[in-house]
């Protein structure tokens, strides 16, 4: 049989380069013994939709340990909703990736990231595509269109796995990228990958608005959804599906599509009418990656989680206003606020994604000591249930109000 195609790589060194900016700086890569390189990945890709091939040359950002590599390559389909590449799952997962010694690759899989194009979510951050932002460095990149993105993503991951010596290759993507991975699973199946983390997908997949189920592709798939994903613009609720042998769906109570962990000190830049969501999905997504890797390597399956409690077209809520059911974190089980996945009516589209945090109508506890005891107990319960990692316990406890 002919060898499966993979990308070939050369270093990108001219110009200034376009970094994957993040409001949350994340771990110091150098202090953790990590190198970052930026590569030009090139090859000939096939369209998933018609019998056609086309040449491509795209950008890949690779972060890998100089020693102590775990053997796991985490490949993120970069998000282009803003009109340029972003790596939201790196922001959520970086602490887990570096402490485990994984390699990470951010792939400019879609045409918008390379060539530029309209933003789905206006951010006011200026021009988008790499070729627009730094033509000296990226001018010879070329992307034939999103119908080739799926093969490009596969070829890049296959080539990088060989380059770094990975024996476990995971695919991850958040929001619009999660929609792309949903299409990938439905069209290509597992292909090269040993597991998929699909994070905050809308109800449809890329190239379709119809609710789409993720099939059993023979490898583990964990879908992590927030409270803010089920209704409204993202409308995930019709695409809910039951857990299966290799499939888990986690719905995180009190979490928004994006949150303070993503935006950090730039919260005021959004101009939202209320403080953005201060939920704790970051810790749940890290736990999902830990479970996914172990499961992909033949370990135990990830735990199942109850669904968020929905009646009609709304959630059921506790007396404080936080939703019931789903994956529970101490921020909702020992509340100091009302955490909503949804912004105030009339909020801008970007603010709608960030939800909001409101004051409790009345304190939930009679004293600070009572609150801290309840918060600590809720933290330990989330760890025992498998939805927060023991290594994150101190960070979660530090978020007590």
Image: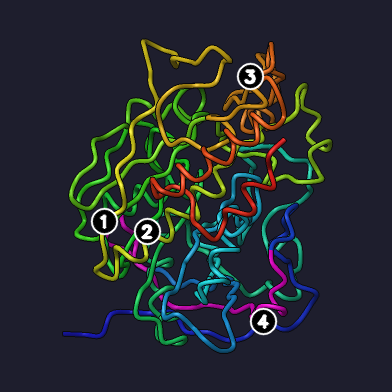
The local crowd at label 3, few if under 14, some if 14 to 19, many if 20 or more residues have their Cα within 10 Å, is some
Sequence order check: which comes first, mark 2 or mark 3? 2
Give the residue at mark 4.
12
With respect to residue 20, does 329 lie above or below? above
Q: Which residue is drawn at 72% across and 56% down?
A: 22
Question: Considering the numbered disc 2 on the image, is that residue within a helix, a strand or a loop?
Answer: helix
Judged by depth in the image, the label closer to the viewer, 3 or 1, is 3
**Alpha-carbon span between mark 2 and mark 3:** 33 Å
Query: Residues at badges 3 and 4 in contact (C-beta under 8 Å)?
Result: no
Q: Residue at x 59, y 24 (%)?
A: 340
**Alpha-carbon span between mark 1 and mark 2:** 7 Å
Give the residue at mark 2.
291
Give the x, y percent position of residue 313: 41, 12
Query: How many dots with numbers?
Result: 4
Q: Magenta residues, as a range?
A: 27-52
With respect to residue 75, does 66 lie above or below? below
Query: Residues at badges 2 and 3 in contact (C-beta under 8 Å)?
Result: no
**Alpha-carbon span between mark 3 and mark 1:** 36 Å
Which mark, residue 364?
3
């Amino acid at each position: 049989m002919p060898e499966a195609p993979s990308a070939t790589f050369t270093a990108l060194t001219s110009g200034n380069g376009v970094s994957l900016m993040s409001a949350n700086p994340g771990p110091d890569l150098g202090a953790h013994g990590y190198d970052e390189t930026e590569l030009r990945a090139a090859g000939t890709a096939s369209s998933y939709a018609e019998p056609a091939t086309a040449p491509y040359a795209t950008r890949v950002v690779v972060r890998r340990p100089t020693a102590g590599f775990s053997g796991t390559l985490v490949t993120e389909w970069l998000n282009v909703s803003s009109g340029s590449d972003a790596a939201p799952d790196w922001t959520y997962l970086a602490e887990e990736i570096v402490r485990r010694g994984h390699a990470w690759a951010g792939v400019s899989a879609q045409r918008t990231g390379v060539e530029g194009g309209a933003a789905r979510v206006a951010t006011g951050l200026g021009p988008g595509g790499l070729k627009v932002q730094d033509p000296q460095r990226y001018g010879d990149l070329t992307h034939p269109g999103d119908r080739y993105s799926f093969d490009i993503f596969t070829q890049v991951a296959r080539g990088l796995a060989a380059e770094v010596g990975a024996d476990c290759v995971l695919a991850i993507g958040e929001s619009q990228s999660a929609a792309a991975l949903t299409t990938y699973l439905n069209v290509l199946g597992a292909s090269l990958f040993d597991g998929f983390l699909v994070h905050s997908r809308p109800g449809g997949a890329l190239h379709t608005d119809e609710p789409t189920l993720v099939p059993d592709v023979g490898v583990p798939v964990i879908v992590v959804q927030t409270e803010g994903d089920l209704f409204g613009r993202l409308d995930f609720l019709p695409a809910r599906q039951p857990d299966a042998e290799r499939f888990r769906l986690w719905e995180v109570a009190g979490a928004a599509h994006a949150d303070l962990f993503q935006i950090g000190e730039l919260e005021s830049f959004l101009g939202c009418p209320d403080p953005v969501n201060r939920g704790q999905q970051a810790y749940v997504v890290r736990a999902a990656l830990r479970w996914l890797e172990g499961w992909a390597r033949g370990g135990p399956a990830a735990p199942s989680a109850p669904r968020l409690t929905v009646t009609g077209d709304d959630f059921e809520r506790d007396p404080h206003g936080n939703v019931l059911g789903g994956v529970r974190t101490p921020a909702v089980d020992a509340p100091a606020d009302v955490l909503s996945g949804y912004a105030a009516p009339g909020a801008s589209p970007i603010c709608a994604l960030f939800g909001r945090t409101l004051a409790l109508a009345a304190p939930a506890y009679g004293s600070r000591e009572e609150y801290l005891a309840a918060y600590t107990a809720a933290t330990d319960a989330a760890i025992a249930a498998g939805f927060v990692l023991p290594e994150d316990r101190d960070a979660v406890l530090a978020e007590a109000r």
